[in-house]
Amino acid sequence: GKTDRVVLCFVHTRKKVMEQVFEKNTKQSFVPHLDPKKLLAEDKFFWEEEDYAVVRSPRQAKGITAFLVFSKTKNHIEDIDVFKILVSQALLVYALEQERRVKQ
């Protein structure tokens, strides 16, 4: 199903802080409910909370883990592997961009 509430966040795994957050539809933000320590403490790559679902990147890059958070829809969330691929690709792009900025 479609959703208009999506957050992509990058969490520093050692410092347990949000490095960067990209959000669609900030009017109904659930970013304030996202605690980096709690996100990192979950030992899963996918889980559902009361009103949103979370997909974690299977790996980290340069000490950063990516999380894709989106509001739950009425339909069943299918093919979590596609979401894992998306969040992993986002992490790769983020890590490459950070590396490029350091070299400048």
Image: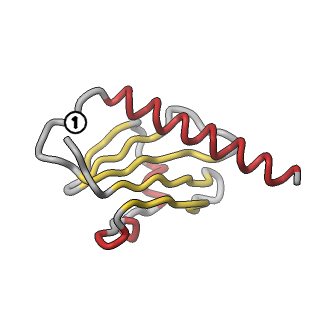
User: On the image, numbered disc 1 is attached to which residue?
Assistant: 77
**SS state under label 1:** loop
Task: Please tell me whether residue 11 is drawn above or below residue 76 in the rendered image.
Answer: below
In percent of width and height, residue 51 lies at 21, 57
In percent of width and height, residue 63 lies at 67, 46
Classify the position of the N terminus by image quarter: top left
In percent of width and height, residue 100 lies at 80, 47
Residue type beneath disc 1: Ile
Please tell me how crowded label 1 is: few (under 14), some (14-19), or many (20+) other residues with Cα within 10 Å: few
Task: Please tell me whether residue 89 is drawn above or below residue 103 in the rendered image.
Answer: above
Residue at x 58% of width, y 58% of height: 16
| Rendering quarter of residue 43 | top left
Residue at x 46% of width, y 52% of height: 8
Residue at x 41% of width, y 46% of height: 42
> Which one is nearer the viewer's eye here, 46 or 79?
79
Is residue 57 left or right of 32 when viewed as pictured? right
